[in-house]
Amino acid sequence: DTAVSQTPKYLVTQMGNDKSIKCEQNLGHDTMYWYKQDSKKFLKIMFSYNNKELIINETVPNRFSPKSPDKAHLNLHINSLELGDSAVYFCASSQGNFYTDTQYFGPGTRLTVL
Amino acid sequence: QKEVEQDPGPLSVPEGAIVSLNCTYSNSAFQYFMWYRQYSRKGPELLMYTYSSGNKEDGRFTAQVDKSSKYISLFIRDSQPSDSATYLCAMSSGAGSYQLTFGKGTKLSVIP
């Protein structure tokens, strides 16, 4: 009964490859997020979708493309991977309620680009 | 100046000590304040959530918000080795924004 799940947990790949990370939430939340946590442990938002619509798109290279097939899923596709993309990527979800705005995180996907 | 500042530590305390973790922020629009706990190689987990100024207590944890000083704190009483983790503060203005701004996290070790 995992609330927010991500696959894969670990991803090791070569520079220039294209890869995808999948996220699913079974909390019935309206809003989902992708975060990047770099080697210095700084957590930074990348994207957010509310009811399948993009609502936050931070300054992220356009090699990163999120896709939300339905409210419960938010996948992240990365083209032409670079060394600097190595990080832990966290998916999260929230009710999307204006007054609560608390987010629940998945376990993370550790991406290593060689 | 970063929007949210948090001392990264590391902070080591003996078991049973009272721990104080703090964040300062510059954006006066922030109204929602959270503390997350992150164990090594795991996702952040929500610990406490506070709206506007004041105190909130939950078991051994107390969150304090002082909006006039733009300063928030998390106190852990009777600290346990299982409290050893990185603690991240996070803030949001609400106002239709779904975005959280995180501190860098403070790494805490509670020594038995």
Image (cartoon, grey):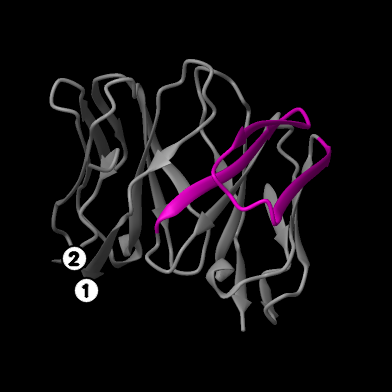
Percent across and percent down for residue B111 are 21, 72
Q: Is residue A75 visible in this depiction of the protein? A: yes
Q: Is residue A2 visible in this depiction of the protein? A: no
Position of A30 with respect to B102 (left or right) is: right
Amino acid type assigned to the residue bearing label 1 in the image = Pro
Position of B58 with respect to A104 (left or right) is: left
Q: CA distance from mark 2 to mark 1?
A: 5 Å
Q: If the image is split into quadrants, where does the N terminus of chain B sit?
A: top left
Which region is colored magenta? A42-70
Percent across and percent down for residue B16 are 16, 60
Q: Residues within 10 Å of mark 2 (few under 14, many from 20)?
A: some
Q: Main secondary structure of the magenta part?
A: strand
Q: Does the magenta portion include A53?
A: yes
Total numbered badges shown on the rendered structure: 2
Q: Nearer the viewer, residue A78 or A33?
A: A78
Residue at figure coordinates x 59%, y 20% from the top left: A97
Residue at figure coordinates x 68%, y 75% from the top left: A11
Which secondary structure lies at badge 2? loop
Which dot marks residue B112?
Answer: 1
Q: Nearer the viewer, residue A60 or B89?
A: A60
Q: Does the magenta portion include A43?
A: yes
Tag 2 residue? B15
Amino acid type assigned to the residue bearing label 2 in the image = Glu
